[in-house]
Image (cartoon, rainbow, N blue to C red):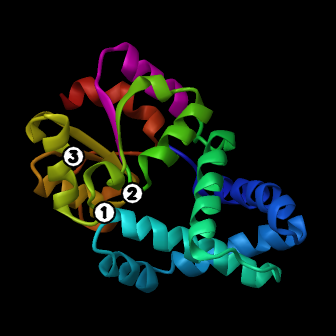
Amino acid sequence: MNDNRLRGMQWQQFVAEFFAPRLGGTHEAWAEANREVMNRILEPVGWEARLQASPDYRSFDRTYLIDWLQGMCVLVGVSAPADDECFALAHQASAAIPPRVRSAFPGVVEAIRALHQRGYALSTASGESSTDLAGYLTGMGVRGCFQHLYGPDLINTHKHGPAYYERIFADAGVDPARALIVDDNPGPIVWARQAGARAVLIGDARSVGLEEVPCLPSLAHLPEVIERLE
């Protein structure tokens, strides 16, 4: 739904506006620190190790937020709060920033509203928390179009295999065979199909060996083809 390049640049600005008055340091230093720390955290091998090391989502979220803020403090050159205070402050920032972000791809908001108006039950299936998702969707003006905001926090399962989708369907009381999962990442497409759902890839399915999966250039095109997919 969102352009991560635009979202990342906006996060740098909003992180600076949030933390500089509270912890000191310049806006420029905080923006650069956020960029550098997030690149480090999201490095694929390190991210995989982080997921595997977490026994549950709550512990993952706490460790992630503390590492995020403390890592930025080191680069900015300010004292980092103790762990509990650090977690609380980082959690406040992660709740305050998403509603301010404006990074939706062209046509996505209109597509979501069109599907909602046609009576389709919409839910998210994201690796981000339901709190973050609520913020982003509120900023997009479409929070009311969605029922469940999954969110590994709602099912205590990372988006990292078919079990994620199995638990979503069970929690929502949805027959997987009647669900349609839309994602721009081939991995979740494979996991959703393993869990019994149909799927649509945003992107070129042929380039990732998923020729049998319907693909679209953008989520904005989904209302045009969803009835045919049914």
Checking the image for residue 127, the label placed there is: 2
Checking the image for residue 147, the label placed there is: none
SS under mark 1: loop
Residue drawn 90% across the image and 69% down it = 26
Mark 3: few, some, or many residues within 10 Å (few <14, many ≥20)? many
- Which amino acid type corresponds to the residue marked 1 in the rendered image? His
Residue 209, picture quadrant? bottom left
Whether the magenta-drawn stretch holds residue 223 is answered as: no
Is there CB contact under 8 Å for labels 1 and 3? Answer: no
- Determine which residue is flagged by label 3: 168
Mark 2: few, some, or many residues within 10 Å (few <14, many ≥20)? some
SS under mark 2: loop
C-alpha separation, residue under disc 1 versus residue under disc 2: 7 Å
Q: Please tell me whether residue 28 is drawn above or below residue 201 in the rendered image.
A: below
Residue drawn 40% across the image and 79% down it = 50
Is there CB contact under 8 Å for labels 1 and 2? Answer: yes
Q: Which residues are magenta?
A: 107-125
Q: Nearer the viewer, residue 94 or 195?
A: 94
C-alpha separation, residue under disc 1 versus residue under disc 3: 11 Å
Q: Is residue 212 visible?
A: no
Q: Is residue 185 visible?
A: yes
Quadrant (top left/top right/bottom left/bottom right) for the C terminus: top left
Residue drawn 31% across the image and 48% down it = 154
Label 2 or label 3, whichever comes before in sequence order:
2
- Determine which residue is flagged by label 1: 158
Whether the magenta-drawn stretch holds residue 112 is answered as: yes
